[in-house]
Image: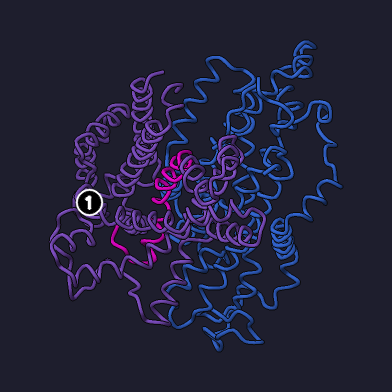
Chain colours: A blue, B purple
Amino acid sequence: MAPDANPHQATVADGTPDPETEAAGGGLVDWAYVLHQLRSSPLTIVGLSLITLVLFTMAAAPWIAPYDPNRIDLTSRLAPPSLKHWMGTDQIGRDLFSRIIWGSRVSVSIGFAIVGISMLIGTVTGAFSGLVGGRTDSIIMRFMDVLLSFPSFVMAMALAAALGPDLINAMLAIAVVRIPFYVRLARGQALSLRERPYVKAAVTFGATRMQIVRRHVVPNAMAPIIVQSTLDIGSAILTAAALSFIGLGAQPPTAEWGAMVSAGRDYLLDQWWYATFPGLAILLTAVGFNLLGDGLRDILDPKLRAR
Amino acid sequence: MSLANIIRRRLLLLILVVFGVTLVTFAISHMIPGDPARMMAGERASDEIVEKMRENLGLNKPVAVQYAIYVGQIARGDFGTSIRTQRPVISDIKKFFPATIELALAAMLFAIIVGVPLGVISAVSKDRLIDHLSRSISVVGISTPAFWLGLLMILVFYGQLGILPGSGRIDGVIGPPTTITGFYTIDAALTGNWPAFKSAVQHLILPGLTLGFLHLGVVTRQIRSAMLEVMSEDYVRTARASGLSRRQIIYGHALRNALIPSITMIGLAFGDLLYGAVLTETVFAWPGMGAYVVQSISSLDFPAIMAFTVVASTAYVLINLFVDLIYMVLDPQIREVG
């Protein structure tokens, strides 16, 4: 639930940006403070480490994966975890450890893409809506209220089913249903920023609405949006994996974590490793983003810091 | 604004949402590649028959008219015939709906029974080991893929230990109890059918725990943060100053007030259980709406998918409305100000 910021209550302590330090759109990071916060929050460090590990895995997949993820080896089908195959093999002898490593590129990137798309469209729409105000604003917001009342997973599922089972379609379907969250968040920020002297000054100097949105509102509204999007990446990854699990996302032979769990389901009782390890990868990645998001919120939102 | 006004406004939103959902499902049905008339008539039907089918289905009429017909049918509870089961979709949904609600209620019950105390303990021992532990549990809860947790449960409790059943709602040998509410546990208890009751409860445990664990995190987080907020209020300090015991303050004052804002969150979470239910039911072969829609998806049974979307969305909005009303009744501040 994105709080609707009241422009009259907006202060620095609310987590809204300080115009003095931020009017230029950057340079607000107090690294000593960030380090202090990190040191006092072990869970954030765990989150940061997990995400670093995931990003490293994605980048270094070709070098750290012991096998080609699609190499079929019928002589070692459904082999249990061993020194040769750390996480065992699947029904056609592909090395699961290598497939999980390569799968990170698919499963995690899709999370970034979903959040990127919905954040971009949502933030611009919300900032515009808040700045323009009046009828346009109310129409946009009523429309968003309606969209927010849809059960998002069910809608994403219906959309993905209609578009056809495919990873890109699943990504688009999930991104679309997430847009309203960012619209509300950015609009609240825009409403409070609209009243700031430097935005009023920009209006006086004849800046267009798009210029104000791009130069002032978007950069200054970023802090809460970054927190929200970090928390969202975890759930976007989970949703994408879930769609893949029910057959609406990645299709074989793509190494994707949700689809791998789904394939491993048929061998659950005898080959426990098959479904277990890809699911563990999803879990650890989602935990990482959620912990990091919580940590970022504590660092960026001074109001919550007190608690 | 008076309570009646708020209700009126919310009902208006409800109508808008249901209207929006039908618009979306209608649009989606028209986005599907392929010709529905040909699909219904069969691949080898002659063009003449396909044309006749098109007329029967109203597909030759203008889009706006088609939409009006579609909404009219939905209003009468007519969602068409399922391509897969060849039965009216509405009777399928009626059959599977109670199973989903029973599962969701069991999950909610677990999440509340475990989550509320965990949130309270976490808040009163903020930043101590137990707080870190409980926060870790809640983060893991919201980060766990439902389908995977379900599989692990089956693997351990059914496969390895063999103490609980891993699929279905009831033992096939026993058979379902006489239908009264559609909830097997309640129906079995009402009719005094104890073997069926035992079996229904046993079948409910693993899916209920799976779905419940995902919501445990939401409940714990909400209670913790509401408790922390309440504990810093003046009246709690006053209560402390007047010598009330810690226990009296926590349970008598703080928790009661922390529960009010939590009702909204927990209620919304109940709406979200629909999401988890789709995955949990699939994994446990639980014959509910979620498993039904996933099977419909794999056979591209669009009348069934769209009917599920409309029914699930309407249920979701109704639950949210109901939760907000409870909230308003419980919180006089909201009732007065709106």
In the image, is residue B266 part of the stretch drawn in magenta?
A: yes
| The one of A253 and B117 positioned closer to us in this rendering | B117
Q: Residue under circle 1?
A: B45
Determine whether A294 is above or below B286 in the image: above
Residue B334 in view of the camera: yes
The residues colored magenta run: B259-288
- Residue A78 x %, y %: 52, 83
Q: Which residue corresponds to the image point at 19% horizontal and 69% vertical from the top-left?
A: B196
Q: Quadrant of residue B26?
A: top left
Give yes or no for residue B52 being in the magenta stretch: no
| Chain on which label 1 sits | B
Q: Residue at x 70, y 78 (%)?
A: A66
**Is B21 or B7 nearer to us in this picture?**
B7
Q: Please give left or right for residue B123 compared with residue A205 in the image.
A: left
In the picture, which quadrant includes the C terminus of chain A?
top right
From the top left corner, tell me how far across and down residue A256 is, in percent: 57, 64
Q: Amino acid at mark 1?
A: Ala
Q: Quarter-wise, where is residue A210 in the image?
A: top right
Residue name at image x 24 percent, y 71 percent: B198
Query: Secondary structure beneath disc 1?
Result: loop
- Mark 1: give few (<14), some (14-19) or many (20+) Cα within 10 Å: few
Seen from the viewer's position, the closer of residues A252 and A201 is: A201
